[in-house]
């Protein structure tokens, strides 16, 4: 589904959720990287709603814990 909405409206709808709670299948990405024997760097960005910056540290910590739990 494609929806054209403004940035802060998207933030209000939860588009910037903690890693592991969105639609990206990080387990499959990790599995593929292992299958192709990839040993380089990857970048996973944790976007945040700038209006909720006071909760950034706990959310980023939660996202990091999730990534570690699936083998990143």
Image: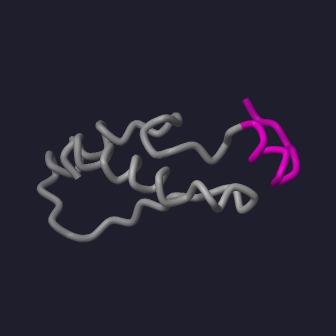
* Rendering coords of residue 52 (x, y %): 69, 55
> Toward which corner of the image does residue 70 lie, by quadrant?
top left
Residue drawn at the location 45% of the way across and 45% of the way down? 19
Which corner quadrant holds the N terminus?
top right
Which residue is more in the foreground, 72 or 48?
Answer: 48
Residue at the far bottom: name it.
41
Compared with residue 45, is residue 69 higher up or lower down, i.e. above or below? above
- Decide: is 22 above or below 40: above
What is the x, y in percent for residue 14?
Answer: 68, 39
Q: Position of residue 21 (x, y in %)?
A: 48, 35
Q: Choose top left, top right, bottom left or bottom right for residue 38.
A: bottom left
| Residue that sits furthest to the top in the current view | 1
Magenta-highlighted residues: 1-13
Q: Residue furthest front?
A: 54
User: Is residue 18 within the magenta segment?
Assistant: no
User: Viewed as shown, does residue 39 lie left or right of 28?
Assistant: left
How many numbered discs? Answer: 0
* Viewer-side residue, 31 vs 45: 45
Magenta-drawn stretch contains 4: yes
Q: Residue at x 25, y 46 (%)?
A: 30
Residue 9, position as x, y percentages in the image:
85, 45
| Side of 54 where 31 appears, left or right | left
2 relative position to 35: left or right = right
């Amino acid at each position: 589904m494609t929806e054209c909405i403004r940035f802060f409206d998207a933030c209000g709808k939860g588009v910037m959720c903690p890693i592991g709670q969105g639609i990206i299948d990080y387990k499959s990405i990790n599995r593929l990287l292992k299958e192709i024997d990839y040993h380089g760097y990857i970048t996973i960005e944790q976007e945040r709603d700038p209006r909720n910056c006071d909760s950034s540290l706990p959310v980023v910590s939660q996202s990091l814990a999730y990534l570690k739990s699936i083998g990143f």
